[in-house]
Image: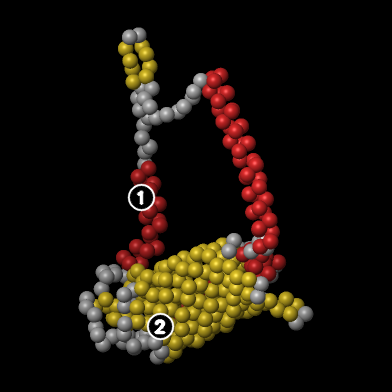
Amino acid sequence: MGRYFAALLSLGMFLAWCSPASHVCAQNTLGGMRASIEPDNQQEKRSRKKADSRRNLWDDDSREDSSFLGGLITSFLFGDDDDDDEEEIEYAGFHKTVADPPEPEKKKGLVGSVIWGVIIMPLAAPKWLLNDEGHYANFSDYPFADDAGNMVITRYRKRSRKLMRTRLLTEYGDNFGRQQKISTRVLLDTRSRVGVDASFDYLREQTGGGEHDQMWLGDVNAVLRFAQSEQAEFRAGVGVAWQADSLGSASGANFTYGGNVFLSKPHMVDFDLDMGRIGEAGLTRFKTGYSLYLNRLRARLGYEYLRVGSFKTNYMSGGVGIDF
């Protein structure tokens, strides 16, 4: 089963790499990413801020005065047309007839329920599918050390089991163009389901003439393992995404969602989705991969789609990791 999945994953990564997102253009360079994150330099931002402040200082009052005078003249000539929610009274002879109140909005509650259901579906569905009843997770010495994939679920804590799990992974990625990257990822998971997920990517690009461009890209997130079983786990969290190079740095908020599925020994698949912002640019990153375990060690073949502002590309990667 693991071999068939690995072949399917390789085919998917090849098709994704051949997609238009991998074509080289001005926006798909590290310089294009930098321009998306910081579209204006700091001096231009300060000048623009001062100009806006002066404009607001002189223009806002005049707009308010003209609006006030216009409203006063309109009220004097045509009367007050206030649309208050007070009841309207119609006179019919000597009797007063109160107008019917407006009909309440229909289906408002149903629409809100549907929207709320769509929002919580990624969190509620895995918990239901894994039949997670909130029991204790007792980590094995390393994945597939027991009959279970990563942990043994019990109604009570086992003191002989580990309190936490740490995963380290280092990979080399290439878009088969001008760009390469070296990635390091650290995932710290605990029995209490709270953990830390961090990644650090070194991006490099050949610019021609023996020159190259480079930068660092990464994120640090606090995550919660919201659904778990002996063969699968899902987590979500929030944190900070950042970018840094010799010209400066930027950061922003990040949301992460991912999971691991332990197939028959020694096969595992994983995925991660990051969505957020870095500076003025939106961030979208999707990663998935297949791992083959040898006790604590594992070899991983993966695919990554990265988009930061106008920059977007696909990477195929391979690396090694260790769990302890």
| Near-viewer residue (304 or 94) | 94
At a point 27% along the width and 76% down the height, the residue shown is 136
Secondary structure beneath dot 2 equals strand
The residue identified by callout 2 is 166
Position of the N terminus, as image quadrant, is bottom left
At a point 29% along the width and 81% down the height, the residue shown is 138
Residue 219 is at least partly visible in this image: yes
- Which numbered dot is residue 113? 1
Q: Quadrant of residue 20?
A: bottom right
Residue 179 is at least partly visible in this image: no
Q: Residue 12, relative to residue 58: is it above or below? A: below
Position of the C terminus, as image quadrant, is bottom left
Q: Residue 37, relative to residue 232: is it above or below? A: above
The residue carrying pointer 2 sits among few (fewer than 14), some (14 to 19) or many (20 or more) residues within 10 Å by Cα, namely: some
The picture places residue 133, in percent across and down from the top left corner, at: 26, 69
The residue carrying pointer 1 sits among few (fewer than 14), some (14 to 19) or many (20 or more) residues within 10 Å by Cα, namely: few
| Near-viewer residue (239 or 33) | 239
- The kind of residue on which mark 2 rests is Thr
Q: Quadrant of residue 296?
A: bottom left
| Near-viewer residue (25 or 138) | 138
Which comes sooner in the sequence, label 1 or label 2?
Answer: 1
Q: Residue furthest top?
A: 93
Asked if residue 221 lies left or right of residue 67, the reply is left
- The kind of residue on which mark 1 rests is Ser
| Near-viewer residue (263 or 159) | 159
